[in-house]
Structure formats: structure tokens, C-alpha cells
Image (tube, grey):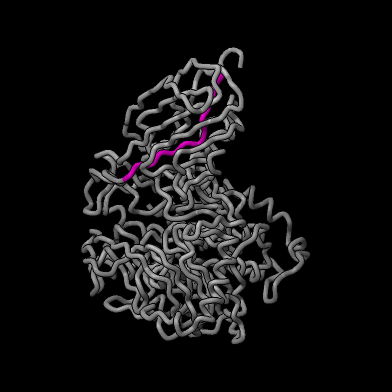
Amino acid sequence: MAGAIQSEGDRQMTDHRSRRGSLKLLGAAALLLAAGLAAGGCSRTDDLPNVVLIFTDDQGYADVGVYGATEFSTPNLDRLASEGMRFTDFYVSQAVCSASRIALLTGSYAQRVSILGALGPYAEVGINPDEMTIAEMLEERGYATGIVGKWHLGHLEEFLPLQHGFDEYLGLPYSNDMWPIDYDGHPATGGNKASYPPLPLVDGMETVETIDDLEGQATLTTRYTERAVSFIERHSNEPFFLYLAHSMPHVPLGVSDKFDGHSAQGMYGDVIEEIDWSVGQVLAALDRHGLVENTLVIFTSDNGPWLNFGNHAGSTGPLREGKGTAFEGGVRVPAIMRWPGRIEPGSVTGRMASTIDILPSLAAITGARLPELPIDGVNILPLLEGDESANPRERFYYYYAGELRAVREGKWKRVYQHRTRSYVGVEPGQDGLPGPYTFPTVPAALYDLENDVGETTDVSADHPEIVRRLDAVADSVREALGDRLTGRRGTEVRPPGRRGFDRAETVSHLAVGASVTLSSPPSPRYPGQGPPSLTDGVLGSRDHHDGRWLGFEGDDLEAVIDLGAARRLRRIGVDCLRAQISWIFLPRSVEVAVSADGDDWQTVGRVAVALEQNPRTGTERVTVEVRAGPVRYVRVRARNLGECPEWHPGAGGEAWLFVDEIIVEGGAND
């Protein structure tokens, strides 16, 4: 298996050599002329350090020996810490997979670049090609670039790693639990999982096999490690960037025979010990090729542990809550960096830093060009080099699900009232099965993290001046990046990459620009551009967050269109979205009525829409033949399905109706 993977890597390297070669033709002389290199940066290609970035999945703050792990050991990570710097206050952008990864690779809060949550196998969005990744930035400096492991920034071809600066890729395009297998290891018979396709293992741009069972999951850490070591060996004579993004310890856990039953903790401990072994293999490869002194190694996790999985989840130690929250246990993660000669061995910093700071720091180290678009990361190189006065990150913003849930400045964390996932007060699952969540509304508070890292005591009444200052900071952040809690749309938010439908993006019809009145507004989560969206002639994409769709949760759409003058009508179409995985269904029926004066209405047509199970995202124009007029007003009623059907994982929950355009076609004289 390993040999086949390595030969495929050689093929990818050859396929992309021409693209990378064109960059290298700039030559060392051109690189020397690059202006504005940061202090401490490199100016010659020969001096460029290698970068190894190891990123685990759902590993808790206390799941490394030097962070307090018990019942399992991590000697290689502990050694890395003894030879480098350990961070006590290191953050990810959001405590969920895709959002965390987009922030890492672009140096921007996930909120800024509009990748939120965890993209599934039917996601229609991904990383925007306008965003510069670490790989693209370093590629311009002549680096070989490779990713091994979990990607999770879009599974469609245009979103995969080779389109975003990486020369080669082996791994899963999304999380290892996004497969048609239930938590007990048997084929799923209900819920989202039942509709998922087989879990693909992708090499380059091709699916080379599928992971079909728990035994396949058990091979991932070793296979990723073999490919990572191969990458180092094949690029030992040139600067390289290796991004090793382990799928573990995300559930379902998988561990090889080498470590099965190895730890006192159980399977989770076994998995962490195998990851630690993987780190050791990477460090050994660097040592064999004499690369230790000129390689920056970074180890961290994408977010905190998924605590409702009980003994198959990690520990946050003293921190509150875990994955999927804006509390410290969700977003504060272990982080270790080693760079001999530049980072003091055995050093520890309590200064804030984040994954979004890695990109600008690497730009400073390598003299690379920063992205042209604004980013949120700061250069932490002075901190790495031991400058005791350095405090590059003064603030951090805690976003989740589009909500600004907290801000931190120094030791102070200001939390805003919000509804959150919680693991408190419920019994977690065991042995791979999940337990429930609770969803409390947490009140606004102020925490002193220096003296209360567990966020237990609200001290806002004792420090009103701190509250006022942080509230002002939060308001400025909302202006730039938005906030669903306060209904703010950020002025600096950029769209994700989107795939459109196989259709024109605009449509001409009789009602373009006509006035629209709604009997009830759409959900504030999906308001489009208001009622005018329904007659602007612009059609939505596959992404229902794109601002073109109006979404109605459990409610019908009733719209009255004023054509401005009496017109003859032939046909009315309602352009609807189907995305059942997101609880979005076609309407139950569409009814059309017309009026000459807006008071007396005549129903002129109605069509029923059959409900069919279909996991694929699509649109359907529900058309009603009317043959009416001349009339000035048109009333369209699209009946929401109401509740998700019995066969849907959200059975009984409120169904969504999404509409982007009402198309009015005129008669022969119109």
C-alpha cells in the first residue's frame, strides 16, 4: 500500500512541476530583489526553512503529556515541547472542522471568509479561489507543498487542495464520520448518514479507494504518516511545506494493531499514542536527512474534544465545555512549535496566539508576499524568538455559527448572551456512541481568565469600565465581520467559493424590478435582499447562504407583485431550492391569484408538487399556467411542506422553503 501511494505522489509532483517550475524560474536573483522583507526573514532560497504543520482533529487541550494528559503518554510531543515553545493560550478561529481549517490556511477569521460549520458530502461551497492559502504563499517562494490527511474545505474539484497551492494530496475530503456507517459500525438506516456516499480516499484529484468499515479507519494514521515521511524524503533537497492533517482523534476512532490496547485510558488513549508515534516518525525523517536545524515544526489541534462521546473523547483539563462552543474548552488548544536556533528550548508563553497568526508569521520568516485581501492574523515571530516585550495579539474574537459570542482582551473575556451547545448535566455516550447535548442560553458575563480559566465567576459588576471598553470593541467587530446575534451584516465579509447551477445566473421576465409585498417576512437568517430579491432577475447559486435566496422556516411564502400597469399573463414560475440535507424542501403547492385593483382577487391556477426523497441539491421552477389579464397585481402562495417527513433525519421538525425569483411571463402582446 505504501509503495503505491509513494509512486502516486511522484506522479502528482511531475504533473504539477511545470506550474511550480514557472514560479522557480523567477530565480534566486529575483527573490533577492523582493522588497520589504520582515525583520528576521530570509532573503535567499537556500536559507528558506522547511515548515511541517501537524494538525489533529478534536484533540483536547489536556490531551498531551505536557498539558496534563493522564492514562496515556506522548513522549514525542513532550520532546517537541522540551526542544521548542509551548503555548498556554493558543486559539482556533471556531470550534468546528471546516471553519477552523479555513482560518488556519488563510490567516483570516472563518467569519470573514464565510466558511462556517463543517462542510458535508453534499456541500455546494468551499474555499474561494480569491483567498490565498499558506501553500500558495509559500509556493511563490519556491516551496514544494504537500497535504496529507483531512482537507474539509470543499470536496468538489474546484475546491480540492491541488487547486489551492498544493502539489500533492492524499487524504479524506471531509470528516471521517461523514459516511453511510452508523456509530455502532453497521450500515446506517436513518438520519443523514443513511444518505451519505462511501467515504473517499483521494490521491491528487482521484478517489483511489473508499473507507468502508472501522478496519479501514484504523489504517488512516499509519497511511498518512507513511506518505508524510515519503514527502520529506522526496523533497529533502529543496524547501518544503508539509501539512499533515490527521483525521484522528475525530470519531469514529481507528487505531492500528501497533497501538490497539496500548494505553491505560482505552481506545482514545491508543489513538493519541499512535498520533504521537506519527510525530516521532516525522521528526526522525527530518533527523535522517539533516533537516532538523532548518525546519519549523508546528503542532496543534483544530478544536477541543467532542465531549458527548465520553471515553472516545478527550479532555479539556480545567477549561469549560468543548467542541462546538465559544468557551475556552472549544477554542483553546494545545500548540507546540520547534525551530532550533530561533526558538528557545523548553520555553512557555502565556501570550495569546492563534492559528490565524501562522500565515503572516510564515510570510515574515520566508519573505513571502502577504495576501492582497485583508487578513486577521498577526506576525508572532518576535514572540517565537523570545522577545519578552512582544505581545502581537492583543485581542481575540470568539465567533460561532455567525454569532459573535465573546471577545478577549488581555486577561478579560466578555461573553454575550447566546444559546449554546453544552455537555453539562447529561450523560455522555460510551465506546463510540454519542450522548445528548443540552442547549442552554448563557447570560452575558465578564471573566478574568488569568484567575478563572474555567469561566465560573462573572465579574462584570466589579469592572463596569472593562465591560464598556470590550462592548465598544465588539461593536466595531460587528461592523466589519457581522453578528447574527444582533442582526448585523459585516462590511468586510467575503463570500465562499460557490458552484452555480447549470443555468444562467439571470432571467428576464415581465416583473423584473416590480414592487413586491410579503404577508410575512422570511427568516432573519435568510432574508436575501428583502422582497425585491424575488423580482430582481438574479438567480441563486447552490449555496443558500448566498444572499439571493429568501428562506421561510415552517411558513408559507405569500407575495403580492405590483406590475405597475395592467398586463396580460400567460405563466407564473416560482424558482425553488431543494436541499433536503439542510431541511430545505420544494413547496407542497403553488397557487396564483390576480387582481386589477389589488382588492378583488381571482384564483387562476394551482399546482401540487410531489414530495420525493432526493439528497442532491437542485432547483425546480414550479410553473402555473394562468392565461389571465389584463391585470396589474399577482399574488403567489407557495405552501411550505410544514414538517420534515418521516423518512428525513429531522422528521417532525420545521421544514424550510427557499425561493429566489418569481418569474412572470406575459401574453402575446406583452
* Residue at 44% from the left image edge and 21% from the top image edge: 602
**Percent x, y of residue 534:** 53, 35
In the image, residue 342 lies at what x, y percent? 59, 80
Q: Give the range drawn in magenta.
A: 654-666
Q: Which of 508 and 183 is in front in this view?
A: 508
The quadrant the C terminus occupies is top right
Is residue 121 part of the magenta span, yes or no?
A: no
Work out whether residue 122 or residue 284 is closer to the camera in this orientation and state it: 122
Q: Which of 131 and 600 is in front in this view?
A: 600
Magenta segment, prevailing SS (helix, strand or loop): strand
- Examine the rendering and report whether any part of residue 229 can be seen: no
413 shown above or below 516: below
For this orientation, the residue located farthest to the top is 668
Q: In this view, does 509 lie to the left or right of 101?
A: right
Describe residue 545's horizontal placement relative to residue 581 as left or right: right
Query: What residue sits 56% from the left and 52% below the top?
Result: 167
Q: Where is residue 388 in the image (x, y as percent from the top left)?
A: 59, 87
- Tell which of 73 and 103 is nearer to you: 103
For the image, the number of numbered tags is 0
Q: Is residue 493 above or below residue 88?
A: above
Q: Quadrant of residue 35?
A: bottom right
Residue 41 seen in this snapshot: yes
Q: In which quarter of the image is residue 622?
A: top left
Q: Where is residue 339 in the image (x, y as percent from the top left)?
A: 55, 76
Q: Which residue is drawn at the image coordinates 75% and 68% (left, top)? A: 36
Q: Is residue 655 rendered magenta in the image?
A: yes
